Image (spheres, rainbow, N blue to C red):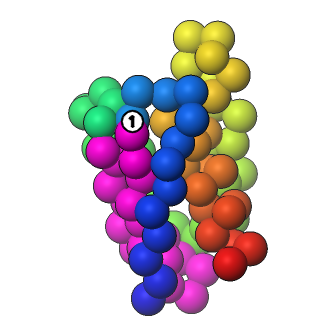
Amino acid sequence: MAKYSYTPRGVCSRQINFEVEDGIVKSVQFVGGCSGNTQGVAKLAAGRPVDEIISLLKETDCNGRGTSCPDQLARALEASKSK
């Protein structure tokens, strides 16, 4: 199982920690951000294929910021695929 840490940009959360095994998201933890929303996103992502989560969450916008915590998770997962 691979563990990753990603520093998001343009959102309230300060860090996203996640684990991936065989292309499946095993766990996600947001540090900071809107607690209920980030906990919900983390629970929904766990157990799903990385590519599915990227497809679902990429380009989700929060209040015109051009990004969001879910979008940042998608970006983090994309970055993890290139490692």
View extreme (left): residue = 35
- Local packing at callout 1 (Cα closer than 10 Å; few below 14, some 14-19, many 20+) is some
Image position, residue 14 (x, y; %): 39, 40
Give 52 or 33, whichever is nearer the viewer: 33
Left or right of 44 on screen, residue 32: left
Q: Name the residue rendered at 49%, 77% in the picture.
A: 20
Image position, residue 76 (x, y; %): 59, 56
Left or right of 17 on screen, residue 55: right
- Does residue 29 sit above or below 2 in this rendering? above
Answer yes or no: is residue 43 visible: no
Q: Name the residue rendered at 69%, 42% in the picture.
A: 58
Q: Which residue is labeled 1 in the image?
A: 13
Give the structural element (helix, strand or loop) at label 1: strand
- Does residue 57 sit above or below 81 in this rendering? above
Residue 29 inside the magenta-drawn segment? yes
- Does residue 1 sit above or below 41 in this rendering? below
User: Mark 1: which amino acid?
Assistant: Ser
Which of the image's four quarters has the C terminus?
A: bottom right
Left or right of 43 on screen, residue 53: right
**Which residues make up the magenta segment?**
14-31
Chief SS of the magenta region: strand
Q: Name the residue rendered at 74%, 74% in the picture.
A: 82
Instruction: Please identify the quarter of the rendering in which residue 49 is found.
Output: bottom right
Q: Name the residue rendered at 45%, 63% in the picture.
A: 5
Give 54 or 79, whichever is nearer the viewer: 79
Which of the image's four quarters has the N terminus?
A: bottom left
Residue 36 inside the magenta-drawn segment? no
Image position, residue 70 (x, y; %): 53, 40
Answer yes or no: is residue 55 visible: yes
View extreme (top): residue = 63
